[in-house]
Image (cartoon, rainbow, N blue to C red):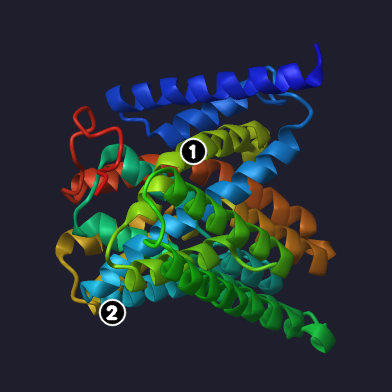
């Protein structure tokens, strides 16, 4: 079979599988994210091997676009939270969760006998989350209350704290291992990834806020939204900065400066689902469940300590921010999903500390598989327990168009 024909067959089947996963998610307790990852694993190389050779390039493309679109929509929601005066609570909880996760994972691994350098590297990796999975679960259940608004703002800035902490711990690991000459290089790279993302998103956000509303709604607005999102995606690749943080900044600037309408956000909302489906299904195809069997005792400790760090960070942060009991109790449970950012961190750490590369990759990949499978389900349960879940069956299939 010719490769183009195979590719189109795969894309058609993928979108129909996404439709089936959405229908199953409405009738079961399994989130659409988890169902798509499982389906991707079944059709991927580790099982039926039905995907074409271009799957790797397609996965990279879909991941870049999905992350940028999700970041843009997160920026709108963060702008809304800032306008309502919720920045203090979001900042306190997000910073506390990141710090306590890193502290508990690093100290816990060191106490069970993991070398201090490896413990520091894994502590930094533990701070990474997967905003795409979190957003998909919230959208799938139609949650719109205070809890979900706060959660969306937290996952929007979580990458920034994670990158900063990982860079600091990577530098500390370099100093402890005797590589003091270039030990501070990761810190400058991390700061550039954050500052560059904020600068790129801010510049494009101001331009987009000026343009939007000056053209006709409908197709022109859709082209405007796609154009700016793709420009930001390409700019992030060129400058090697965080997709999510840059897109979130652009969305927040547009939300705060163009208050007369929300049409660009509605257009991206209508377009993001195919890319999300493709991203999660191909992510599942890249998973190898045997990696779970290779994590060992240290890997199991890493997983358990990260769960503890998230829950404790959410509770302590909520206490410091004087949040309601439902937020203190459940916000940490929603911050479990972990995907591409953690793998990227592990690859960077493995390159700089090759003698720890095997342990780093085995534990990170094994934990990522587990958290990406179980994390969305925990997020859904937390939304339900916090009383922030709308009716799944009766929710509208399209966003309200203003």
Q: Position of residue 226 (x, y in %)?
A: 52, 50
Residue drawn at (29%, 59%), measured in percent from left and top? 261
Would you place residue 222 above or below residue 96 in this image? above
Residue at mark 2 = 88
Residue closest to the eye, 159 or 97:
159
Q: Is residue 242 visible?
A: yes
Q: Position of residue 211 (x, y in %)?
A: 45, 65
Q: Is residue 302 visible?
A: no
Q: In this rendering, which labeled residue sits more in front, label 2 or label 1?
A: 2
Image quadrant for the N terminus? top right
Q: Which image quarter: residue 209?
A: bottom left
Residue at mark 1 = 373
Q: Helix or strand or loop: what does disc 2 sit on?
A: helix
Marked residue nearer the N-terminal end (2 or 1): 2
Answer few, some or many: residues within 10 Å of disc 1's Cα (few below 14, many 20 plus, some between 14 and 19). Answer: many
Residue drawn at (33%, 38%), measured in percent from left and top? 140
């Amino acid at each position: 079979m010719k490769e183009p024909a195979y590719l189109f067959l795969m894309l058609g089947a993928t979108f129909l599988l996404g439709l089936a996963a959405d229908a199953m998610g409405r009738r079961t307790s399994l989130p659409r994210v988890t169902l798509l990852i499982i389906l991707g694993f079944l059709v991927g190389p580790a099982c039926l091997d039905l995907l074409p050779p271009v799957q790797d390039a397609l996965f990279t493309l879909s991941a870049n676009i999905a992350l940028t679109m999700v970041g843009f929509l997160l920026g709108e929601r963060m702008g809304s939270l800032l306008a309502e005066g919720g920045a203090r609570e979001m900042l306190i909880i997000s910073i506390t969760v990141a710090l306590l996760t890193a502290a508990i994972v690093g100290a816990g691994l060191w106490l069970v006998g993991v070398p201090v350098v490896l413990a520091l590297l894994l502590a930094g990796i533990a701070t990474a989350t997967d905003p795409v999975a979190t957003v998909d679960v919230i959208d799938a259940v139609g949650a719109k209350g205070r809890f979900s608004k706060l959660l969306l703002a937290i996952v929007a800035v979580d990458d920034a704290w994670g990158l900063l902490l990982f860079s600091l711990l990577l530098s500390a690991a370099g100093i402890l291992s005797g590589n003091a000459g270039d030990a501070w290089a990761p810190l400058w790279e991390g700061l550039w990834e954050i500052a560059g993302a904020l600068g790129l998103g801010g510049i494009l956000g101001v331009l987009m806020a000026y343009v939007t509303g000056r053209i006709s709604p409908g197709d022109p607005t859709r082209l405007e939204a796609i154009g700016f999102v793709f420009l930001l995606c390409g700019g992030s690749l060129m400058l090697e900065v965080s997709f999510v943080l840059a897109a979130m900044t652009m969305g927040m600037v547009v939300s705060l400066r163009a208050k007369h309408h929300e049409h660009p956000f509605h257009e991206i909302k209508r377009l993001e689902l195919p890319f999300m489906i493709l991203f999660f299904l191909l992510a599942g195809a890249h998973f190898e469940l045997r990696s779970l069997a290779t994590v060992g005792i240290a890997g199991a400790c890493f997983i358990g300590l990260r769960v503890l760090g998230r829950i404790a960070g959410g509770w302590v942060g909520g206490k410091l921010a004087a949040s309601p009991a439902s937020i203190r109790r459940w916000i940490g449970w929603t911050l479990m999903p972990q995907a591409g950012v953690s793998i990227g961190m592990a690859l960077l750490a493995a390159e700089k500390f090759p003698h720890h590369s095997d342990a780093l990759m085995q534990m990170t990949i094994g934990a990522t598989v587990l958290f990406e499978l179980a994390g969305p389900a925990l997020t859904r349960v937390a939304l339900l327990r916090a009383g922030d879940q709308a009716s799944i069956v009766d929710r509208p299939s399209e966003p309200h168009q203003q």
